[in-house]
């Protein structure tokens, strides 16, 4: 078989194109199926029924500390808290004192994110406010900006606890940490540790879900019941709602 | 005097020979670039070619870190925790090469590497 000059050149060109394209073909291979990703259509939120939250119960606090390897240094001024119980008293005694859990409110307009000089604090597509501890320089602007006192600085070096949760890294000395809505669990389709414990061994005061999904329990309860957020006047649009406050 | 010298030479040869044989006998060690001895990995293949990983694992880890933290893209098969399934001992793999190369990554100040 003989080929004319045009065919030979054409085949050479085809080979060159194939060589050029081949690496690109590998690059756009489909990602493995075990990958998760935060979706922009979702907005995770929490609802706390204050009437069901009993003063002596610390189930959510203990579960959080265990799940996220949150250290206690033994110094109340330096201890790290991702969630804490606050006791509220009516000055005119019209209502008996009650308690409620206070944690990061995962605001839609988070002041902590706005002040962060290194872009370590950020808001994820699904509304969870997080700290990229790899970037945090520990300047504590965010701690001053947050009206909920949700953030703590890690003052001391910590060791990984022996019975610690291997899914959550500990935090190095000199970074700021706070509640993540148990983002590692949420990405796996589980509830945050505090909510799961509250529904299991606690009082069933907390629920968690996607507030953008009209079928979810939280969306329906926020729509139908009278719920409030703490310091709604600040316009931060928190995503931790309270019922019966 | 000659006898003593002979004994010393024989001893030296024996000790060196045993040490060399011992090193060769440790079949759980593999020779990486530049002569550092690392623990032999358990699995059949790494998630990327070995040559590529040797040079670029840090870029891969930083890329995965940003994707996981910022985008919530958690790929279990390629997480740092998964390295442990083939390289069970951090001291004999990560740390030994990092010591040899004189780099001090701070991954393990926070991240757990279960043994």
Image (tube, coloured by chain):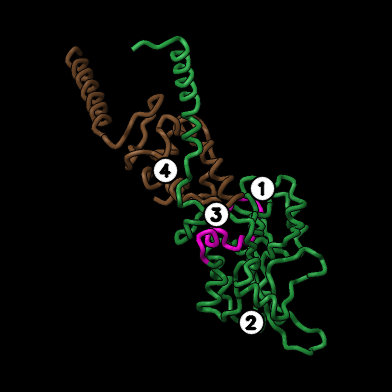
Chain colours: A green, B brown
Name the one closer to the observer, A159 or B68: B68
Q: Which residue is mark 1?
A: A136
Residue A141: say if magenta.
Answer: no
Q: Work out how far the residue at label 4 is from the one at label 2, CA to CA, in angstroms.
A: 45 Å
Q: CA distance from mark 3 to mark 1?
A: 14 Å
Which callout, 3 or 2, points at the residue further toward the start of the chain? 2
Mark 2 Cα-neighbour bin, 10 Å: few <14, some 14–19, many ≥20:
few
Q: Are marks 4 and 2 on the same chain?
A: no
Relative height, residue A215 to residue A26 (above, below):
below
- Residue A157, position as x, y percentages in the image: 58, 52
Q: Which dot, 1 or 4, sits closer to the camera?
A: 1
Majority secondary structure of magenta residues: loop
Going by the image, does A224 lie left or right of A93? left
Are the numbered discs 1 and 4 placed on the same chain, yes or no?
Answer: no
| Residue at numbered disc 3 | A170
Residue located beneath label 4 in the image:
B90
Q: Chain of mark 4?
A: B
**What's the distance in space between the residues labelled 1 and 4, CA to CA?**
26 Å
Residue A219 vertical position relative to residue B82 in the rendered view, above or below: below
Check disc 2 and report the residue beneath it. A55
Q: Chain of mark 1?
A: A
Residue under disc 4 on the same chain as residue under disc 3: no
Task: Report x, y in % for residue A143.
Answer: 73, 57
Label 3, residues with CA under 10 Å away: few <14, some 14-19, many ≥20: many
Q: CA distance from mark 4 to mark 3?
A: 18 Å
The number of callouts visible is 4
């Amino acid at each position: 078989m003989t080929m004319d000059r045009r065919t030979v050149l054409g085949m050479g060109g085809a080979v060159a194109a194939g060589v050029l394209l081949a690496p690109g073909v590998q690059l756009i291979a489909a990602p493995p199926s075990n990958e998760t990703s935060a979706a922009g259509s979702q907005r995770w939120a929490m609802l706390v029924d204050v009437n069901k939250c009993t003063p002596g119960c610390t189930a959510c606090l203990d579960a959080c500390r265990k799940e996220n390897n949150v250290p206690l240094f033994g110094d109340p001024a330096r201890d790290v808290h991702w969630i804490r119980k606050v006791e509220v008293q009516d000055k005119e005694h019209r209502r008996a004192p009650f308690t409620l859990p206070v944690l990061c409110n995962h605001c839609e307009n988070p002041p902590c994110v706005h002040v962060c000089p290194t872009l370590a604090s950020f808001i994820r597509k699904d509304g969870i406010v997080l700290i990229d501890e790899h970037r945090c320089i520990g300047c504590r602007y965010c701690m001053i900006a947050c009206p909920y006192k949700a953030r703590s600085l890690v003052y001391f070096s910590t060791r990984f606890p022996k019975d610690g949760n291997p899914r959550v890294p500990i935090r190095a000395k000199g970074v700021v940490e706070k509640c993540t809505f148990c983002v590692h669990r949420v990405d796996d389709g589980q509830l945050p540790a505090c909510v799961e414990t509250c529904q299991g061994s606690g009082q069933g005061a907390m629920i968690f879900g996607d507030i953008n999904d009209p079928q979810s329990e939280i969306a329906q309860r926020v729509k139908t019941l009278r719920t409030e957020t703490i310091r709604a006047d600040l316009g931060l649009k928190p995503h931790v709602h309270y019922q019966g406050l | 005097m000659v006898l003593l010298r002979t004994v010393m030479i024989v001893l030296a040869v024996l000790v060196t020979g045993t040490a060399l044989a011992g090193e060769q006998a440790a079949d759980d060690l593999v020779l990486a670039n530049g002569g550092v001895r690392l623990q032999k990995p358990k699995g059949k293949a790494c998630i990327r070619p070995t040559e590529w990983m040797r040079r670029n694992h840090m870029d891969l880890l930083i890329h995965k870190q940003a994707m996981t933290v910022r985008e919530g893209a958690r790929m279990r098969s390629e997480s740092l925790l998964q390295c442990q399934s083939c390289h069970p001992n951090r001291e004999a793999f990560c740390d030994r090469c990092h010591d040899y190369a004189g780099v001090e990554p701070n991954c393990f100040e926070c991240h757990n590497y279960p043994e």
